[in-house]
Amino acid sequence: MSLLADIYISRDDAEAVRYDTDPATFGDREQFKSITILEISTLWSLMRGIEWDANLLDQFPCVLEIHNGERLIHRLPQEMAANLASLTPEEAFTAASKWAVTEELACEPGEVQPIIDGLVRLARKSSATGQRIYFWNCV
């Protein structure tokens, strides 16, 4: 069984929940596997140089939950989107290096760099269009 993890932009929560049934209509998206909002929140804490705390998850509101969490959609904080949009390539590489060695991921930086690059691209697009970033998981 694979854990799907898509990141996309949308105008608002009402539109964002439609991703669950019609993802092809969302042109600005990135598709990954095996990450959850826990790993995304860990990345954000590393980017800000703060210790991760479970309360950080409260800043990623769940806008859709189906079948006890088999499918979830979370909205990323605007502050995280702004942080991502301002990352330089060097800062993105540093973030990937720190994120890769976390207990949750334990991988090579090159394995998570595409995720960060995708987040940066979507953050810049969402900033330019006034949209929000959403994170969809499906087990």
Image (cartoon, helix red, strand yellow):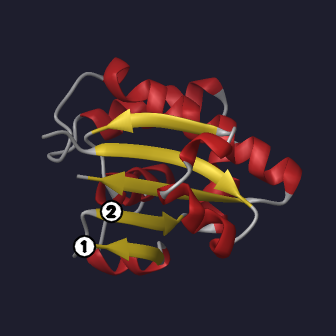
127 left or right of 80 in image: right
Residue visible at 16% across and 34% down?
106
Residues at marks 1 and 2 touching, judged by CB atoms closer than 8 Å: yes
Residue 87 rendering spot, x and y as whole percentages: 65, 38
Residue 69 rendering spot, x and y as whole percentages: 25, 70
Q: Residue pushed farthest front?
A: 21
Q: Could you say which is closer to the camera, residue 16 or residue 118?
A: 16
Residue 47 rendering spot, x and y as whole percentages: 49, 50
The quadrant where residue 54 appears: bottom left
Mark 1 Cα-neighbour bin, 10 Å: few <14, some 14–19, many ≥20 = few
The quadrant where residue 71 appears: bottom left
Provide the residue designation for mark 2: 71
Q: Which mark is residue 30?
A: none
Q: Could you say which is closer to the camera, residue 35 or residue 65?
A: 65
Residue visible at 21% across and 39% down?
105
Q: Which mark is residue 67?
A: 1
Q: Amino acid at mark 2?
A: Arg
**Residue at disc 1, secondary structure:** loop
Q: Would you place residue 6 above or below residue 81 in this image?
A: above
82 left or right of 16 in image: right
